[in-house]
Amino acid sequence: MKLSNLVRGRAGTVIAVAAIAAVAGTGASVAAGNITSAQIKDGTIQTKDLTKNNFAKFTSTENVVTATTPISANPAYAGARVVDVAATGQTPLVTLVLNKGTWKLDGVAQFFHLAGPAPAGADLGIVTVPGLQTGFGTNFTADIPNGGNNAAQTDFGGTIKITANNTPVVITGAIAGGDTGQAGVSVTATQYEYVKLFKGGNAS
């Protein structure tokens, strides 16, 4: 082998080793400290770098409150969960008692003509949920059947923000046209809370 080739080969090896050492040294110095956002160039962090061990974990818990119109004491209503709806104004159908926070409501209302004279024309059941941030505060049924156990029914839902603990939310009913009848409501309120967890499952 020519001496010039040997020198170039050894020199190349030395340069390569020196370059690797420099890179390794740089990596060690970066790893020794905390990397801040100022040191990260846009687009250089990949999804694979974001492992589950790099972040605090979150878990969700649910608070659930339910309420249903109680069974009527009137024997003519055969155990139906209803109250008599007045001809005027808003009749309370059920009350939820909620603590501070944002709640998601899901419910159903039913309107009947279980007793008394049948109305002459069509009438609609109207259920009102006060304070909704999303969803419809007033919901309508189809025509209420005249007599019997058949009901006109409507679903309702939305979110509501409560500002103080033990706040009553009164859901009311009415019947269009000044007619009377019976109505009941079943409703579920769900509050979602997110709890920050660190490694090992310790809450923050």
Image (cartoon, rainbow, N blue to C red):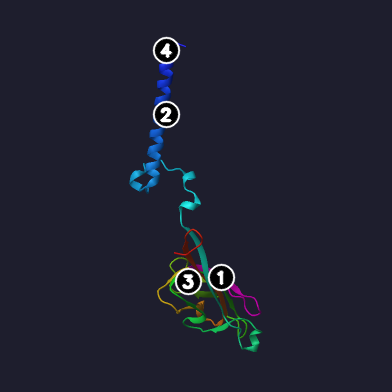
Q: Mark on residue 3?
A: 4
Between tags 2 and 1, which lies in front? 2
Q: Please name the residue shown 49% across and 52% down the image.
A: 53
Q: Position of residue 153 (x, y in %)?
A: 58, 72
Which amino acid type is shown beneath numbered disc 4?
Answer: Leu
Name the residue beneath numbered marker 2. Answer: 17
Q: Is residue 12 above or below residue 197?
A: above
Instruction: Give the camera-side residue of 172 and 140.
Output: 172
Q: Is residue 127 above or below residue 12?
A: below
Instruction: Give the camera-side residue of 40 and 6.
Output: 6
Name the residue beneath numbered marker 1. Answer: 154
Left or right placement of residue 80 versus residue 123 in this view: right
* Of callouts 3 and 1, the N-terminal one: 3
* Of callouts 4 and 1, the N-terminal one: 4
Between tags 2 and 3, which lies in front? 2
Name the residue beneath numbered marker 3. Answer: 138
- Taking the magenta stretch, the answer to whether it contains residue 146 is yes
**Label 2–label 1 contact, CB within 8 A:** no
Q: Which of the image's four quarters has the C terminus? A: bottom left
Between tags 4 and 1, which lies in front? 4
Residue range in magenta is 142-158
Residue 188 in which image quadrant: bottom right
Which amino acid type is shown beneath numbered disc 3?
Answer: Thr
Q: Please name the residue shown 51% across and 62% down the image.
A: 201
* Of callouts 4 and 3, the N-terminal one: 4
Q: Please name the residue shown 42% across and 29% down the image.
A: 17
Residue 42 seen anywhere in this rendered image of the structure: no
Q: Position of residue 80 (x, y in %)?
A: 63, 81
Instruction: Give the camera-side residue of 20 and 62.
Output: 20
